[in-house]
Amino acid sequence: MKICVICVTYNRLGYLKRFLESVEEQKSCIDSIIVVDNCSTDGTQEFLDSWIAVSRITGKRIIRTLSNTGGSGGFDAGFRAAAGSDCDWLYVTDDDAFPDPGFFARAMEHLDGEPCGTVAVCSTVYNKEKIDVNHRRNSFIEGCSYRSIPVPVERYCESRIEINTFSFVGVFIRKSAISVNSIYPEKDYFIWYDDSEFSSSLSKFGKMYLCPDLVVHHDVPPSSPGWKKYYGTRNRLLMIGKHYDRKVFLHEAREVLRKNRKSFLKNLLKGRLNRLKINLMVSTAVRDAYRNRKGIHRKYRPGWKA
C-alpha cells in the first residue's frame, strides 16, 4: 500500500518547515509527497529547492503555481498530479497541521483493513489542545434548510464514526475514487468550502469515516481576516446550489440576506461604518453565488480590510 502526501502552502515558510519535519519524523509509510507552492514570496521556493535535494522521502514533487490560486486551486493541482501516480491513498493536509509521532503507522493499520467501499478516513483535529469538532461533520437537508452538524466530542471515544463532510486537514482519500470518478476540488472557490464541496461529491461513491485515534494538531488563530467572509458566504451557497434542489439554495440565500439586513440596520443605527462594509460584502457574496460567479473577487482580495 502506497501513500502520497499532498500539502498546499503560501507564504508560511515557518509552518511549512515544521510540517515537513513532522512528516520526515514518521520513519516510514510515506512513499511520495507533493508540495504545492502557491507562488510564495517569502523564501519558500529557495527552501524547497534545498529540501528536495536532502529529503529522504523517495518520491518528491514541487508544483509552483504562477499566481496565488488559494487553497482550492492548490489542492486541485495536487490532486490532479497524484491521480496519475501509483499511490493507493492520498493524505491531504494544510501546512499548519502536524501529525502525531507514529501517525502514519497507525493509519496504515486502518487503511489495510478498509473495504473498497471506503473512500476516506479522517483524523481527529486538535487546536490549542482541544478537539476542533468543526472539521468532521454530517450534512443533510431538513425541509428547505441545509444542516451541517459536527460530530460531538462525546463520540470521539468510539473506534470509528461515519461522516459525510470533512475539511482538508488530515484526511486520507482513496486515489481510485477520485481518478475513476474524476472528482476534484472546485479550483475557482479560491478558499473555504472547497473541502466541504469535495466531500459532498465523494460521499456519493462510498463511505467516509472519522478514526479518533489518528491525531493531528492544527495551529490556527481564533479569528480569520474579514475578507475571507466573502468566500465563505459565496462558496457555501455555491456548494448548496450544486448538490441540492434550487429551493434549498434560495431558502439559504434568503436566510443569509435576512440576517445580514438585521445586522446592517443595527450597525447603521450605531454608526459602525466598518461593519457596514462587511454587510455590503455579504450582500455581494450572495449576489455572486446567485449568478454562479467564482474566482477571486476584484475587490475582496487577500489583504482587504473593512
Image (spheres, rainbow, N blue to C red):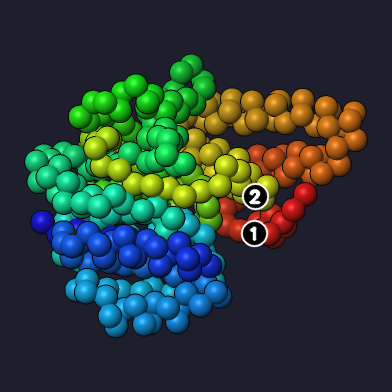
Which residue lies at the image location 37% right of the left edge and 26% below the top edge? Answer: 153
| Residue type beneath disc 2 | Pro
Is residue 91 among what the camera can see?
yes
The picture places residue 55, in percent across and down from the top left corner, at: 27, 75
Query: In what quadrant of the picture does the N terminus appear?
Result: bottom left
Which residue lies at the image location 45% right of the left edge and 52% below the top edge? Answer: 186
Q: Which residue is mark 2?
A: 225
The picture places residue 19, in percent across and down from the top left corner, at: 37, 61
**How many circles with numbers are drawn on the protein?**
2
CA distance for labels 1 and 2: 8 Å
Which residue lies at the image location 37% right of the left edge and 41% below the top edge? Answer: 125
Q: Which residue is mark 1?
A: 302
Residue farthest along the top direction in this orientation:
143
Q: Nearer the viewer, residue 272 or 180?
A: 272
115 vs 231: above or below: above
Which residue lies at the image location 15% right of the left edge and 42% below the top edge? Answer: 110
Q: Nearer the viewer, residue 214 or 258?
A: 214
| Residue type beneath disc 1 | Pro
Q: Quadrant of residue 274?
A: top right
The picture places residue 100, in percent across and down from the top left corner, at: 29, 49
216 vs 21: above or below: above
Left or right position of 178 against 290: left
Q: Quadrant of residue 81?
A: bottom left
Secondary-structure class at tag 1? loop
Is residue 196 among what the camera can see?
no
The picture places residue 270, in percent across and down from the top left corner, at: 89, 30
Label 1 close to label 2 by CB (< 8 Å): yes
